[in-house]
């Protein structure tokens, strides 16, 4: 491909980077989602009925231009964790317990020992994030060594 000016080259590279970021974001989402599925599969509550709010709160942001590139996020939307008041835990309390593998929070009674939905996937992602992005950039035709 021949570029007539620097702007054409920059636009081409940015499009490829955007595509790589979309693929990388999906990889990150799938890793965290796998742990969330494990978390839900390993415990059947007896004291409360599941709402699956935590499961549905894992979201991917839109890809946003930053001026010099793009950004994307994968996160748990605390705003979608709305539990009854009273002895029921807050969304933040449920998320904090689940991040370490704690199940249930009825009256803040936490059943520990399960799959962590944040800390465990973050350990994987901290070692794999750069390699994932590198693989996605290479798949888009940007040679990275």
Image: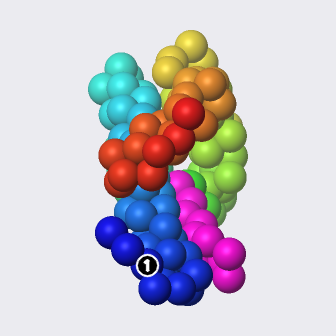
In-image side of 15 versus 95 (left or right): left
Image location of residue 122, percent across then percent down: 61, 32
Q: At x 61% / y 45%, what residue is drawn?
A: 95
Horizontally, residue 30 falls left or right of residue 118, namely left
Q: Residue at x 58, y 81 (%)?
A: 6
The magenta-colored residue range is 65-74
> Between 132 and 138, which is closer to the camera in this rendering?
138
Is any part of residue 55 visible from this angle? no
Badge 1 element: loop
Of the 4 image quadrants, the one containing the C terminus is: top right
Q: Is residue 121 above or below residue 113?
A: below
The x and y percentages for residue 43 are 37, 23
Can residue 95 be seen here? The reply is: yes
Q: From the viewer's side, name the closer residue of 104 and 15.
A: 15
Q: Which residue: 56% across, 13% down?
A: 113
- Residue at image position (36%, 52%) is 141
Q: Is residue 71 magenta?
A: yes
Q: Main secondary structure of the magenta part?
A: loop
**The N terminus lies in which quarter of the figure?**
bottom left
Q: What residue is pinned by disc 1?
A: 3
Q: Is residue 35 above or below residue 24?
A: above
Q: Nearer the viewer, residue 78 or 50?
A: 78
Between residues 145 and 116, which one lies in front from this camera angle? 145
């Amino acid at each position: 491909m021949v570029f007539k000016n620097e702007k054409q080259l920059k636009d081409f590279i940015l499009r490829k980077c955007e595509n790589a970021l979309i693929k990388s974001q999906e990889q990150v989402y799938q890793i965290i989602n796998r742990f969330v599925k494990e978390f839900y599969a390993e415990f059947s509550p007896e004291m409360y009925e599941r709402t699956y709010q935590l499961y549905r709160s894992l979201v991917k942001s839109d890809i946003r231009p930053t001026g010099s590139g793009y950004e994307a996020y994968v996160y748990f939307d605390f705003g979608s964790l709305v539990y009854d008041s009273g002895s029921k835990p807050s969304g933040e309390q449920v998320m904090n317990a689940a991040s370490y593998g704690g199940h249930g929070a009825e009256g803040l009674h936490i059943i520990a020992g399960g799959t962590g939905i944040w800390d465990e996937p973050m350990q994987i992602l901290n070692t794999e994030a750069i390699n994932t992005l590198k693989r996605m950039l290479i798949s888009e035709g940007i040679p990275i060594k």
